[in-house]
Structure formats: structure tokens, C-alpha cells
Amino acid sequence: MRGFIYTVSTVIVVLLGVWAYHEGYETRATEKAVAQLEREIGQRHQELSMLRAEWAYLNRPDRLQALAEMNFERLELMPLSSDHFALIEQVGYPLPVLVAEAPVVAAEDFSDVIIMNHRYGADTQPRVIAPPTLADDGEQLP
Amino acid sequence: MIFRRRPRPEPTDPFQPVPTRVPRAAPAPVAQAPRENPEKVRLRAERRLKFTAACFVMGFATVAVKMGAIAASEAREPSTGSLSGATIVNARADITDREGRVLATNVTATALYAQPHKMLDPVAAAEGLARIFPDMDAETWARRFTSGSKFFWLKGNISPEQQQAVHDLGEPGLLFGSREMRLYPNGPLAAHVLGGARYGAQDVRAAEIVGVAGVEKTFDAYLSDPAQEGAPLRLSLDLPIQAAVEHVLDGGMKLMNAKGAAAILMDIKTGEVISLASLPDFDPNSRPRPATEGDPADSPLFNRAVQGVYELGSTFKIFTTAQSLELGLTNAGTMIDTRGPLRQGRHSIRDFRNYGPQLSVADVIRHSSNVGTARMALDIGATRQKAFLESLGFFEPTPLEMVEAASGRPIVPERWPDITTMTVSYGHGLSTSPLHLAVGYASVLNGGTRVTPTLMAQETPPPLGPRIVSARVSAESRHMLRRVVTDGTASMGEVPGYHVGGKTGTADKPKHTGGYWEDKVIATFASVFPAHDPKYVLIVTLDEPEIRAAGEDRRTAGWTAVPVASEIVRRVAPLLGVRPDFDPAKDDFGAYLTQMARR
């Protein structure tokens, strides 16, 4: 009995030793990985600030203005001025005109057809929105 | 059992000699040591036991102390001991404008240094360096490399091409250090505000960046404070607006043949400086050295808007009338005697031309009558006039967050006799910076409360300052200024839709030797827009403008500063988000009063 206890405890001690040894190495490896990651983060931060500086340099007002002038024929960019603003009353919406009568075809039944009574734009035909036609099995046809 | 004796051989073979049995001799008696004193032995044993026990106690005590320490201390992740995190990157914080656009940032750079004791061939190295860097002399550096010194800085900042060329020399004694470099991506834009930076203490691994002027110097501690964790410094400037102002001002300066120009755009309520320009300017990426000869005020480093103190002329008249109105001495319609010249001792004050025997207060401003303002100032008196100007900050340097602001100290006359009262009333005899004028205009015209100029973007509107004039006087002053533009000396200042109001000022430049130049002036236009609902104050100053227009040489502000200012307003007001308003009814004084009542 005593010999058994001795054997078991020896084995446990050995296993614990192996476990602790393993954990120690794993911790050290993780530490190394963290340090590596931190270095990488630092490097990325540096790259980011470099890119931000480059972005600011490429978007400096002098350059944008020179580019706008060079590409004036295509872009026609002008400095913003007060006559680029307008009051909402100055926007030329066409007035809604009442259409006298929608064309009625006697042969067909238009009871379930919605007739748009307002015309938008100068010479638009009145639009007729019909409900979708359904096939025999209830599927909608194009 | 292992050590069992072998059985004795039986004497079976007759020819085998049988070993005779000789009894083993008894061992010689060992000389017996005399028995030790039992008391001594006991003491020794006790000592050994005590020592062993002490060892055990100490061992267990160590374990106990460590356990206690672990139990008592806070649970924390073990640090890896590396410093290469994100913390030391960006040692100096960025500077941005109010919308977060970068005005100053850092980029990595390479420095070149030499360790001559590691060199294989110092003379060849010096020759190679002289080939790569034309400003390095081969002989000088060969002498230095062989002088026995162990370290030299060669270049603070080299390009990747130069680095490759130095690398190709294959000299182990030439080494590269990495560092950060301050970069101003917008070049000379807002150069005077930003100032510039140089290297402070430097090491081969890093170099400290120190601000030398402008906000870089004022906020040096803040920018290099690691506790801020790289939070950028947000200025009140607006990059596109600053660019537009500088662009127009530069064009205007050249058109008007001026040798310098300054412009300040300020939020009338918060005192935030939206744009501050001074021309000629410089590139803060390679800040020029301060001029050692000539007038420092002609150096591009000189900030005319903040450092330059000038007699700003008739722009001061509005302060005289506002005070007169505030004191109840006059109202806008009171008739003022404008018969000139007005004699005071040896001096006589006259107008640009004769405006008749009398003008109303509003017309004194509209025609810019020196005689009229001088008479009003005499009614106010020196003491009250001084107190009023002092409350507007005209006697102290402006508190703007730039190191240069302190050097913009106004030149105030020591004594204040009646003649000074009269000349100061129309802006002569008191020299202030254009920024002082901007603060004065903002304080009088924003409804009458004092503003403090600032370069910091304000998160919340600052509390109202002390009251300078009543809201009604403020509205009346704005209305007078509006009439200067609609039918007065600043008729070129009209910008459709923005209701600009302002006052011109043309002052002769003082000579260094005393007296005034006949043909050199400082032309200023101080304006507010929109006049009925004031949002911004714009000051434009031109130094020695001269233009030939309508068959005459023109130097007055109405012909020089006003067109430049109106072009600035035209360009900048839409960018500022000011809504254009083409309603002519807004120019009635009634509109000013309703606007005043609404706030």
C-alpha cells in the first residue's frame, strides 16, 4: 500500500513538473509574440501617420487649385460665390396641371386601374398604373 | 543472501594441498581516543540542530512572505518589458484646423552620423561624402575624421536616395539614425500661425522636436506631453478659408503694388480667428533665419497681423462715435460742426475735402470727417476716451496664443493732451496691430460685448464678455458702417448678398527719423458682414499700396484695401456657410433692430 502511494505521488510530482515547465515556455513564447505584435502595431501606427501626412500633402489647397485650373475644361470648377445659392421659391417647379379627362376605352373595364390625374413636366402623357396581372397559379407575370 | 559465504571445499583430492587453518591474528588494539566531554558534545549537537531549524524557518518565512505579497498585491498582467509599443511613436502631437485637417504632423526621417574610429579609410569616406553632399568639403571632413574624435553628426535629415548613395560607399563608420521630422504638408499656408520647429536634444535613435515660433512654441509643452496620448491640437483656423484668403490677398498685394499685406478673419461672437494671413510669408518646413540686417519688419518672418503696430487711421472713428452714442452725447442724427481747419495749439486738423458746415454723426462716418470726429472726441474728453479704448484692449498686447502676440505691444502716447484726444479719435497717434482692431470691431459690433481673440477651436461658445456698448449702439454703429459701403468711401466693398459694412482707414507711414512720409500709407479696411446680423469681422491692411486708377495715383483705402477685402468676402463667405440675402429691406435700420431684439 505504501509503495503504491509513493509511486503515485512520484508520478504526480513528475507530471506537475512537466506541466510547469511547459507553461513556463508557453508564457515566454506568448510574451515574445506580444512584444512582436506591439512592435508591429507601432510600425503600423508609423505607417498610418506617414500615409496621413501624404494624404494631407496631396490634398493641400495649392495643389487642388492647380489641378482644378488644369482640368478646367473637363470639370469647370469655379470658386463658390453667392449667385450659386438660390431661394427655394426660385426653383422652377412646373405647376401641377389638372388633366381634363383620362382616355377611356369602353371595351375594357378600368374599375381597378388608378389614373394619375396630375401631369409633371411639360407634355407628359398621363400615366396609368395597372395592378399586376397574375397567372393562373398566382405567380406574377412580367 | 548475496554476500553468502562460499561453501568450504571438502578435502577430497589427496593431492590438493589443504590450506592450513591459521587462526586470524587478533587486530592490534587501536589506541582509544580519550572520551570527549559529554557536555561539549551536547552543546555542539544543539548548535547544529538550531542552525538547521533556522534554515527551515527562513525558507518557510520566504515562502510565506512571497505568498503574502502575491495575495496582497493587485492582479496585473505581467508586462513584457518592451517599449516598442504605440506609445513612443508620434512623440509630438499633430496640429489640425477646426475640421481636423492636418496642418502639422511628423514623418520618419533619417539622420547621418559618423564614428571615425570604425572607419576603414577616413579620407576616402570624406571624399565620397563630398561627392554626395555638395555642401560638404572633403578636406575639412577628412581632417575631422582623422582628428581622433569618435562621433560627428553629419546631416540631420537625408533623402532615401542620399541614404542609398552613402550606403553604397560601404564605409562601416558612416551610420544612419532614425528620427521624426516635423512636416507642414500645406507649405507656406498659415506659416506665421504655425511658426516652425527644429531639433532639440538628439540621439542616434531619436531626436526631440522643439517649436521655435507661433503655436508650435506656445504649445510646446502640450504638444510634446505624452499624457495627451497624441491628441492633436485643434486650432480655430479653417484650411480652405485660410487658403482662399491668402490667395486673394497675395493677388491683391501684387495688384496694388504693396510691399506687405495682412488679413484677419474673426468670428464676431467667439473671437475665434478663422484666418490670419501675413504677406510676404515663408515655408515653415525650411524656416529662414531671422534677418540680421535691415528692418526686421520687412522680413517674411514678421507677422504683420499680430506683431506689426501701425496707426490704423480712420477705422478708429467708429469707436469715437460709438462712445459718443453710448454716453448719450449725440445720436445718429445729431448735427456736428465740421468747419475746418480745426486749430489746436500749433496743430490744425483738416478733412480730405470740405464737407460743408455741418454733418450728422452718421454722415461724419460716411464721409470720414476728421474735424467732425475730433469735435466729438473733445466732448467725450481724454479720460473717458482712454478708459473706453482700454476696455477694448488697445493699450495691451493681444492675448492670442502665439509667442509673437506679446511683441505686438501698442505704441500709446505717454501724455494725453487735447490734441492727442483729437488725433486718436481718427486713428492717429496710437499704433496698434490689425488684430487689436479686429478685437475692437468685434467687441463693438457683435451686440456690444468684449471678445477675447483665440486660436483654439472652441467646443462651446465662450461666456459673454463685459459689456462695452449697448446693443442698440452696436446696431447703430453697424448701420453707419453699412452706409459707408452703400454710399460712402468704401463703395467698392459691396458684395451682393452679404451686406458688408465697414470703414476705410488711410494713414501716412511715420518715418524712422520722425515726421510722416508724403507718399507712403497704410491702407486698412475694417469690415463686418452681414451687417444686419453680424457673424464675421474682416480686417485687411495693405502696406504702401499704390495704384493708378481713373487717371490718378491712388493710395487711399477706398481704392486699394477695399477691393481686396470685398474679393475676400466674395470668396470666403460662401465657404463660411453665410447665407446670401438679396433683400434690400435688410439695409433698413428697422431690420437691425429686429435682429437685435431676436437675440
Image (tube, coloured by chain):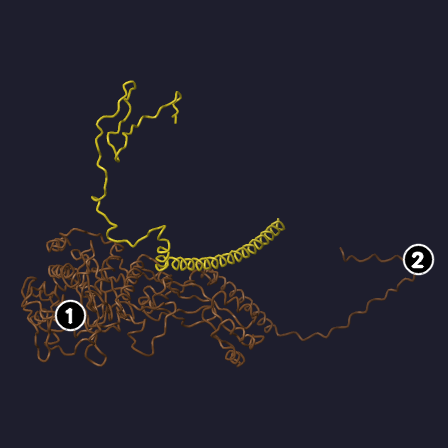
Chain colours: A yellow, B brown
Residue B65 x, y percent position in the rendering: 47, 63
Image-quadrant location for residue B406: bottom left
Q: Are marks 1 and 2 on the same chain?
A: yes
Q: Nearer the viewer, residue B75 or A90?
A: A90
Residue type, numbered disc 2: Asp
Residue drawn 55% across and 74% down? B125
Residue B124 x, y percent position in the rendering: 56, 75
Q: Identify the residue at the far right of this view.
A: B15
Residue A135 x, y percent position in the rendering: 39, 22
Inter-mark Cα distance, 1 to 2: 148 Å
Q: Which mark is residue A125?
A: none
User: Does B371 sit above or below residue B273?
Assistant: below
Callout 2: SS: loop
Indicate the quadrant containing the N terminus of chain B: top left, top right, bottom left or bottom right: bottom right
Residue B544 x, y percent position in the rendering: 24, 71
Q: Nearer the viewer, residue B196 or B78?
A: B196
Residue B256 is left or right of residue B378, and the answer is right
Residue drawn 17% across and 77% down? B413
Indicate the quadrant containing the C terminus of chain B: top left, top right, bottom left or bottom right: bottom left
Disc nearer the start of the sequence (1/2): 2
Residue B519 is left or right of residue B345, and the answer is right
Q: Which mark is residue B389?
A: 1
Callout 1: SS: helix
Residue behind mark 2: B13
How many residues crowd around disc 1 within 10 Å: few (fewer than 14), some, or many (20 or more)? some
Q: Identify the residue at the far top of this view.
A: A107
Residue B302 is left or right of residue B203, and the answer is left
Q: Chain of mark 1?
A: B
Residue type, numbered disc 1: Leu
Residue A61 is left or right of residue B584, and the answer is right
